[in-house]
Image (tube, rainbow, N blue to C red):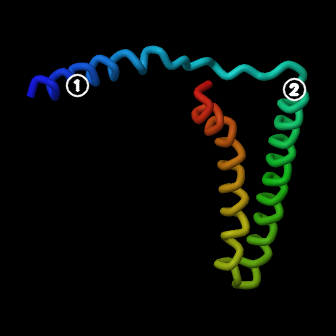
Amino acid sequence: MTVLDTLITAATHLAAIVPADIPNPDPVQPPGTEGVTTIMSWLKWIGYAVVGGAIIVGGILIAVSFRRGEGHDSLPKVLWPMAGAIVIGAGAAWIGTIAGG
């Protein structure tokens, strides 16, 4: 049992030391890649513009469909663009959470 006790003690000490030695650096953008963030912000803006247009068109379709008595078919035409807006808006927060920034 003494050899087993010695191995357990050594493993416990090693487990306490090893995590302290692993570095956890902050994410840093490489030099010369500033254009990537510009493109990402443009894509986000374009996404919001497309989603906004889709919501407006969906609203028009709902108004026309309710007039004809087919309003239940048009509701997803507004709900899906709204879901897209939520995903676009949450994208930056999700990446920030995953990257630890």
Q: Which mark is residue 7?
A: 1
* Label 1 crowd bin: few (<14), some (14–19), many (20+), radius 10 Å: few
- With 83 as the anchor, is 7 left or right in this view? left
Q: Position of residue 22 (x, y in %)?
A: 50, 19
The image quarter containing residue 77 is bottom right
Q: Quadrant of the N terminus?
A: top left
- With 7 as the anchor, is 65 left or right in this view? right
Query: Where is 16 relative to 87, above or below?
Result: above
Looking at the image, which residue is at 80% across and 41% down?
44
Query: Where is 68 relative to 90, above or below?
Result: below
Foreground residue among 8 and 97: 8
> What is the three-letter code of the residue carrying label 1?
Leu
Looking at the image, which residue is at 69% across and 36% down?
92
- With 63 as the anchor, is 101 left or right in this view? left
Q: Position of residue 7 (x, y in %)?
A: 22, 25
Q: Which type of secondary structure does the marked residue at label 2 adopt?
A: loop
Q: Which type of secondary structure does the marked residue at label 1 adopt?
A: helix
Work out how far the residue at label 1 is from the one at label 2, CA to CA, in angstroms: 49 Å
- Farthest left residue in view: 1
Q: Which mark is residue 33?
A: 2
> What is the three-letter code of the residue carrying label 2?
Thr
